[in-house]
Amino acid sequence: MSETEDMSTLSVVPDANPTTSPWRAWLEEHGPKLLLFARQQTRSHEDAEDVLQDAFVKLVEKIRNDDFVGGQDAWMAYLYTTIRRLAIDLSRRDTRRRKREDTVGTEADEESVSHFHPWFESDSSDDEIRQQLEVKLKELPEKFSEVIIMKIWGDRTFAEIGEALGISQNTAASRYRYGLEALKKSLAGARRRGDLSI
């Protein structure tokens, strides 16, 4: 599909007959340039199309409401400004959304770390060993670490783990074995490198 064809799907026309209107001719001439500009202002082709569509809608609303000043000669300047503003707004929304997601993820990570403390702490526990275990558990693929945590600290049977994770009892048992083996190798490597004093 060409960019001109893309633009026809985005067209919002102020006239009753879009196929013969001056708007349609104007759109076919300037639409690809505006789409290229929108693509430079946004993170994806889809975002560029959305921003451009929103800019066209705003222009058409202004024209239909007799709020637009300057006539057809001012359309390009208005659209460039509007595309840029809408792209900035979209970027800010995306950044805020990512920050919220990261905050939630960080809080979840901190919460999961705080859940590790009672599991590893005892009168004789070594902070270094506890921290190393936490790190090594986090480095395991999630499918292994979640089974280990549910089995050892959650005191769940393989049948219960399987049901909770939507896997078979045998799969839960093998993930547990593979996970423990991977954890053992990882801790042995840390001990050989001197990262762990056990």
Image (tube, rainbow, N blue to C red):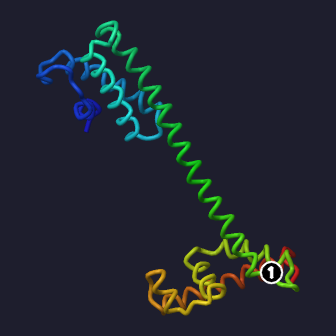
**Residue lying at 24% horizontally and 23% vertically, measured from the top left:** 28
Q: Quadrant of the C terminus?
A: bottom right
Spot occupied by residue 58 in the image (x, y as percentages of width and height): 33, 24
Q: In this view, does 167 lie above or below 91?
A: below
**As drawn, is 158 to the left or to the right of 129?**
left
Q: Where is residue 175 in the image (x, y as percent from the top left)?
A: 55, 85
Picture layout, residue 106 above or below residue 63? below
Answer with the quarter of the image where residue 33 lies.
top left
Crowd rating for badge 1 (residues with CA inside 10 Å; few <14, some 14–19, many 20+): few
Q: Position of residue 92 (x, y in %)?
A: 53, 37
Report the number of numbered marks.
Answer: 1
* Left-right relation of 186 to 97: right
Q: Which residue carries the number 1 mark?
A: 121
Q: Residue at x 72, y 85 (%)?
A: 184
Left or right of residue 140, residue 120 in this image: right
Q: Residue at x 69, y 82 (%)?
A: 183
Image-quadrant location for residue 123: bottom right
- Amino acid on which the number 1 mark rests in the picture: Glu
* Relative vertical location of residue 168 with respect to residue 77 in this rendering, above or below: below
Mark 1 falls on what kind of element?
Answer: loop
**Quadrant of the image containing the N terminus:** top left
Position in image of residue 63 (x %, y %): 27, 16
Task: From the viewer's side, name the closer residue of 183 and 162.
Answer: 162
48 vs 37: above or below: below
At horizontal 21% and vertical 18% (from top left) the residue drawn is: 23
Image quarter of residue 194: bottom right
